[in-house]
Image (cartoon, helix red, strand yellow):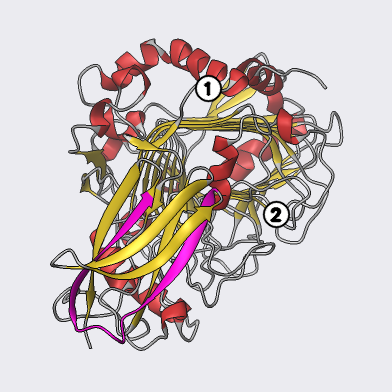
């Protein structure tokens, strides 16, 4: 099998055919210049007819409004280039917005249907209609990467593009892949409010279409990109996957379900990124049944990995387990208190401001639980170098709150949506301030720079974790300083991904990989509660319960256990109400937590 070098291969795959000689620039008038819809459609159609599309740059005006009157189709073997000046900090410098006509009778399945290549820079794609009164409606549409019948390769480069308010569309994502060799790059982009009023698993950044087969992504890269309020971020399904996937300096906030789905990774790097509130729907042990596993196993909020040939990965691929290269490094993970409290049942002492009418009355197995950063099943891939020599993890800051300054979080809307999905599956919106988007308000009403001093220097090279372009650009030397050393950082990532990490790896700073004692659930409890824990390697393990005087009241397990995740139940029906402590002892590791029994 070929020995690929990740970064070099990615660039080699992406750059050819995007370097057309540009010979003509067309300044496109917008709706306010002409009072007409379809000005962008007309300008592009004229160049297609003239046979000069690939050699034309279409320049859109700052704060322009371009209302589509029909799908813009890029013919096979050709290239569409849309650019605008770099946005500033005033309303007049806002990126130009492309949206849909509110007229009826127009097919809105695709805003762009790209049989050829596409390049966008400094563009705002609104997946909705709008008008001069600032009233708009979300539209199920997508930018489709369609099969190129000339060389069968589709290339897309997106720089500082905002993908805004995208719902289910045709069953894919804001960018949908319907091609056999897609090569996509997203730099300094923002996927915002990709929410669906009905489906918790739609509203995606990049996705194959549901129930298709035969499509494939050669390479997919996200650098300095933010994903805020999403159903999924990236979706692989139906034996359709990507060879090379890269996330570097990305910010993930409020994902309803998967961040990265599914676990069919060949080359994957997730580095220098921040995860907050992933998989908000939670894990429901009595409801969620993961194929090939028991229902007590959570998926994990950040990343999931499956074995080749497992129930979830049962199709042919051109690589073996030993050929897989996965790097999860310099990342943080956190689920905010308001979300944890809302999942848990109301309690006047321990959860006086939380709970909901579903969790308050549900049986234990049906109460939603916060997802861990990754499951014990996934953790084992990082701890077995004989089978997976190039799957590595380092410098991960689990349970670390970045402290976003102004997060775009619609807490009321999210709570309402979750309750409906947990109960009657009725519809509601949970997007953050969509009317400001429809009215093209600039700058946007959020700021995902953060206050946590540790995470400000936790990235490679001492830079902050997360999207530096959008949130740290006005901090002296942060983005520009990072940009100056980007090539060095890319080489570091490439080396770690290609060669793996030797020696002891850590999944959370200061904690050996795989040792974890979770908070019991529910807590407080009456009379039974579940305790979930993980051990890194086959060990002599004890799990005991003590009262406040230090007296042992129960031994939940004592003996040898294999590496992985384990679950124990504690029945307190024979002891009095009060505070108890439970302690996991595994080799030299000892972890203790507190729980409350209330009759």
Position of residue 298 relative to residue 553, above or below, is above
Q: Quadrant of the N terminus?
A: top right
Q: Position of residue 463 (x, y in %)?
A: 30, 23
Q: Magenta stretch? A: 563-585
User: Left or right of 70: which side holds 467?
Assistant: left
Q: Quick one: 302 or 25, which is closer to the camera?
A: 302
Q: Quadrant of the C terminus?
A: bottom left
Residue in the image at 31% along x and 87% along y: 573
Between disc 2 and disc 1, the foreground one is 1
Q: What whole-number distance in Å separates the C-alpha atoms at marks 2 and 1? A: 29 Å
Q: Which mark is residue 237?
A: 2
Q: Quick one: 521 or 304, which is closer to the camera?
A: 521
Name which quarter of the figure residue 216 lies in: top right
Position of residue 457 relative to residue 146, above or below, is above
Residue in the image at 66% along x and 61% along y: 170
What residue does disc 1 label? 501
Q: Classify mark 1: residues with Cα within 10 Å, few (<14), some (14-19) or many (20+).
A: some
Q: Which mark is residue 521?
A: none
Q: In the structure shown, which secondary structural element does the residue marked by tag 2 occupy? A: loop
Q: Is residue 572 magenta?
A: yes
Residue in the image at 70% along x and 54% along y: 237
Q: How many marks?
A: 2
Position of residue 364 relative to residue 324, above or below, is below
Q: Classify mark 2: residues with Cα within 10 Å, few (<14), some (14-19) or many (20+).
A: some
Position of residue 386 relative to residue 96, above or below, is above
Name which quarter of the figure residue 85 lies in: top left
């Amino acid at each position: 099998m070929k020995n690929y070098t990740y970064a070099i291969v990615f660039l080699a795959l992406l750059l050819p055919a995007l370097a057309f000689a540009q010979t003509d620039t067309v300044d496109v008038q917008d709706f306010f210049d002409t009072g007409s819809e379809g000005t962008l459609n007309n300008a592009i159609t004229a160049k297609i007819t003239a046979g000069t599309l690939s050699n034309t740059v279409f320049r859109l005006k700052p704060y322009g409004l371009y209302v589509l009157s029909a799908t813009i189709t890029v013919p096979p073997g050709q290239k569409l280039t849309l650019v605008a000046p770099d946005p500033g900090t005033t309303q007049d410098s806002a990126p130009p917005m492309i949206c849909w006509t509110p007229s009826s009778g127009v097919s809105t399945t695709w805003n762009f249907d790209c049989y050829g290549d596409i390049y966008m820079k400094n563009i705002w794609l609104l997946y909705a209609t709008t008008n001069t009164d600032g009233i708009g409606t979300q539209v199920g549409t997508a930018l489709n990467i369609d099969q190129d019948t000339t060389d069968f390769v589709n290339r897309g480069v997106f720089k500082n593009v905002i993908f805004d308010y995208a719902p289910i569309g045709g069953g894919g994502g804001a960018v949908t892949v319907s091609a056999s060799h897609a090569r996509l790059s997203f730099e300094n982009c923002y996927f915002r409010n990709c929410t669906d009023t009905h489906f918790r698993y739609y509203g995606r950044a990049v996705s194959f279409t549901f129930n298709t087969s035969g499509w494939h992504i050669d390479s997919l890269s996200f650098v300095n990109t933010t994903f805020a309020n999403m159903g999924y971020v990236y979706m692989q399904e139906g034996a359709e996957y990507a060879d090379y996937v890269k996330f570097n300096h990305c910010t993930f906030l409020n994902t309803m379900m998967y961040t990265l789905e599914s676990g069919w990774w060949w080359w994957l790097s997730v580095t220098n990124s921040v995860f907050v509130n992933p998989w908000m729907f939670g894990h429901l042990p009595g409801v969620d049944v993961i194929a090939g596993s028991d229902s007590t196993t959570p998926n994990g909020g950040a990343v999931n990995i499956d074995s080749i040939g497992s129930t979830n990965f049962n199709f042919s691929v051109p690589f073996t387990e030993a050929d897989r290269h996965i790097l999860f490094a310099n990342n943080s993970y956190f689920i905010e208190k308001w979300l944890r409290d809302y999942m848990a049942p109301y309690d006047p002492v321990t959860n006086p401001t939380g709970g909901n009418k579903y969790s308050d009355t549900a049986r234990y197995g049906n109460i939603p639980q916060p997802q861990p950063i990754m499951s014990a099943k996934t953790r084992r891939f990082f701890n077995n170098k004989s089978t997976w020599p190039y799957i590595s993890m380092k410098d991960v800051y689990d349970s670390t709150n970045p402290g976003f300054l102004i997060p775009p979080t619609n807490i009321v809307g999210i709570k309402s949506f979750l309750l409906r999905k947990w109960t009657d599956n009725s519809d509601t919106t949970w997007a953050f301030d969509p009317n400001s988007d429809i009215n093209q308000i600039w700058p946007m009403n959020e700021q995902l720079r953060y206050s946590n001093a540790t995470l400000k220097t936790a990235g490679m090279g001492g830079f902050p974790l997360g999207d530096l372009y959008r949130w740290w650009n006005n901090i002296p030397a942060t983005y520009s300083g990072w940009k100056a050393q980007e090539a060095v950082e890319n080489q570091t990532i490439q080396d770690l991904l290609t060669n793996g990490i030797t020696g002891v790896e850590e999944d959370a700073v200061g904690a050996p990989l795989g040792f974890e004692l979770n908070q019991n659930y529910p807590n407080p409890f009456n009379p039974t509660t579940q305790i979930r824990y993980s051990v890194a390697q086959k060990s002599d393990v004890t799990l005991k319960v003590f009262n406040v005087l230090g007296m042992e009241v129960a031994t939940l397990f004592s003996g040898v256990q294999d590496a992985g995740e384990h679950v124990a139940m504690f029945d307190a029906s024979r002891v009095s109400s009060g505070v108890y402590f439970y302690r996991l002892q595994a080799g030299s590791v000892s972890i203790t937590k507190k729980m409350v029994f209330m009759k």
